[in-house]
Amino acid sequence: MGRTCGGAALSLGFAFCLLAASAAMARADAPFTNETAEAGGVTGFLGLYTSIKADAGGNPSISYYDENNGALKYAHRSAGVWTKEIADNATSTDVGQSTCLALDGSGNPNVSYYDASNRNLMYAVKSGGTWTRTTVDATGDVGRGTSITLSTGGEPRISYYDASNGTLKLATKTGGSWSTETVTSTGAASPYGTSLKLDAQGNPGISFYNETDGNLMYAHKSSGVWSVEVVDASAEDTGRYSSLAIDYLNRPHISYFDATGGHLKYAEFVGGVWSVQTIDPATNVGWDTGIALDAGGNPRISYYNAFWGYLMYARRVLGSWQILYVDSSLQDVGQYSSLTVDGSGRPLMSYFNSVAGDLKYAFGPAEVTGVDDDPPASSTHRLAIYPNPSLGGPVTIRLAAFHRSPVSSVEIVDLGGRRVRRLAAAGASTVVWDGRDDEGRPAKSGVHFVIATGPDGRVEAPQRLVVLR
């Protein structure tokens, strides 16, 4: 589970507009906590191309690129303490871009990455306290946009781009030997990464971006044959920074960026067809996405809001999407985001602070909500909220009843889950919130959620409401 791994945030320009704020402490938005895993500096960036995984104890490990030293690095957190080490700086003078991390059954790190000096695909594994490095493919300019996963036997599989031939490739290690194959030559686009996962039968699936046509693509191998299909061709340019997860029913889920509209989008394969949704319709959001599924198959997505320079998090609960801020400090944070969910259901994220040049880490509370398919048939209401965003004035909340009991109350809660206001509904079809809390004070600016509750205590799926003052 996790991000594209090979995707690249291509602009750091916004960072230098915020240098005056660089001394400010990074602010984690409830319910998230963040910290600096390794401090860098504006002349020596750390934390680019991050990839995060959790071990059996829920401890995070991160592979990342040290731009200042041209090195691949690895960090592991245990008992609240980060240990950092160089995984490769001996292969050449510039190694470690396009990193992607997988942990084997013993917790040993396996990392795919790009040797920019020699233009080769590389693989490093740590076992018995020692790093071993292998050149996997050295034919032309190969190895950008890597993504790695392990078979049930712990053998690595790596997807990547062959920039010399414009092809998407897969490298497989079997019995100690590496082999490579071409997946497709259809519009491969190296700057925007690949994402690789294996289904329950061990068949590889890869999401990628077709630069020629500007489409999101998906490749899957079954019975030794590759099939390649268009997932989303709805816009002139959609599919950058894709990240792939495959659920327990072998259904692929993909998060990605629609560059035409500037939105975060999500696609899932259900009932034999691709279903595509815009998750965050704000401006210039959805860069560097990372997707992961919790134990119930619920998708969670980390991504970069390039308009404000924030790290964001989206989660689907009972069919409805919620958008949360993870880190909205007065610095440019969130590029190169990567996401995993640990065994207890906690979302863990790695990302880059491009003002301070730091490697960052954030985590939230456990939030497994059960198997996530369509909303249950007994769901009784939907909410229509307007205006949304609100400028602090009255907000009308329309309750569209179906066939069950009426709504008894409506609650407004803030991003941290704290109740702001409870409104009695008493079977009404419409209620109006005056923008104030239970004490009569104006509600603070930010993201809120509107939740309808039935007389039997049933809580309906929350709807997002933004208050601006």
Image: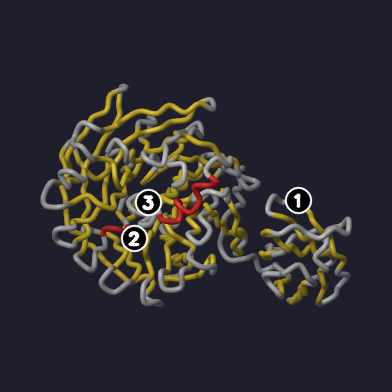
Q: CA distance from mark 2 to mark 1?
A: 38 Å
- Residue with the most extreme left position: 139
Q: In the rendering, at what x and y percent does residue 392 appear? A: 76, 67
Q: Which mark is residue 200?
A: 3
Name the residue located 83 percent from the left edge and 64 percent from the top edge. Answer: 409
Determine whether, in the image, residue 33 is placed left or right of residue 235: right
Amino acid beneath label 1: Arg
State whether residue 135 is above or below residue 431.
above
- The residue tagged 2 is 207
Q: Nearer the viewer, mark 3 or mark 2?
A: 2
Nearer-N-terminus badge (3/1): 3
Name the residue located 75 percent from the left edge and 51 percent from the top edge. Answer: 418
Task: Look at the image and tell me whether residue 248 can be seen.
Answer: no
Determine whether, in the image, residue 144 is placed left or right of residue 47: left
- The residue tagged 1 is 418
The residue closer to the viewer here, 435 or 121, is 435
Amino acid beneath label 3: Ala
Report the quarter where the C terminus lies.
Answer: bottom right
Amino acid beneath label 2: Ser
**Neighbour tally class for label 1: few under 14, some 14-19, many 20 plus, Cα within 10 Å:** few
Q: In the rendering, at what x and y percent does residue 11 appear? A: 38, 57
The residue closer to the viewer here, 327 or 113, is 327
